[in-house]
Amino acid sequence: MVKCHIVIQTFWPECRLFVISRENMFTGIIEQQAKVEEIVQNQSNVHFRLTAPFQNELKIDQSVSHNGVCLTVTNIEENGYWVTAIHETLQRTNLSHWQVGSTVNVERCMPANGRFDGHIVQGHVDCVGTVDEIHDLDGSWMIFINHDANAGITVNKGSICVNGVSLTVVDSFPDAFSVTIIPYTWEHTNLSSLKPGQLVNLEFDILGKYLKKFTVSLQISKK
């Protein structure tokens, strides 16, 4: 487990410092793709058995990002490992659309001595977005994604996590954004299988979410 403490100096005298402290942290750099092998419904929960190249290195109670969703490994077998999604997770993410054979982007928590190659990803999905357009740019791909305007904010050249992948925002709108995918990411993640109309898990930049909350709070306090 990695515990991360980040202190941010804001621009307002009323809010000098704030601290982000998380037990688990990801960076949005996908390690491998897992495959859904079995799905078991148990009341409002759903148990998934997956296989992945690194499954022999996993431990029970380990946190692993699946399409950007932090899930706990509950059991390990010779033919895969199990994770459980509760009702809240199924409602907020695209996990309810998984089928046997689906490929899933997976990433283990960043080790304490690891490099920060992506950006801060908590594994807490804010909402699902809808793929609007996909353009082949002859060597790269541009994807336009729509989302609930109240779910989060993006900025040009800022960070966004899509299905667990750390990406840079190209165009930013109140309820949409675009990203460009390089060939390596296209080949090594499930973004290459996306089609218009499909749902993707979105986690907006945590720093932007905190700053937005501070801004709203200050506006309310000054009224």
Image (cartoon, grey):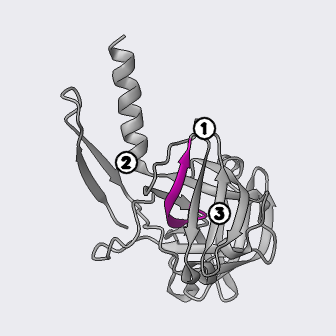
Magenta part of the protein: which range? 162-173
Q: Residue at x 57, y 74 (%)?
A: 106
Badge 2 element: helix
- Give the percent coordinates (x, y) of residue 117: 37, 73
Q: Mark number for residue 207?
A: 2
- Give the percent coordinates (x, y) of residue 44: 76, 50
Picture quadrant of residue 2: bottom left
Q: Label 1, label 3: how many angstroms apart (C-alpha)? A: 18 Å
Mark 1: which amino acid? Ala
Give the mark nearest the N terminus, 2 or 1. 1
Secondary structure character of the magenta stretch overall: strand
Picture quadrant of residue 67: bottom right
Most extreme residue toward the top, as rendered?
223
Q: Name the residue under label 3.
A: 143
- Give the percent coordinates (x, y) of residue 215: 37, 30
Closer mark to the observer between disc 2 and disc 1? 1
Residue 169 belongs to magenta span: yes
Mark 2: which amino acid? Leu
The answer to whether 199 is drawn above or below residue 66 in the figure is above
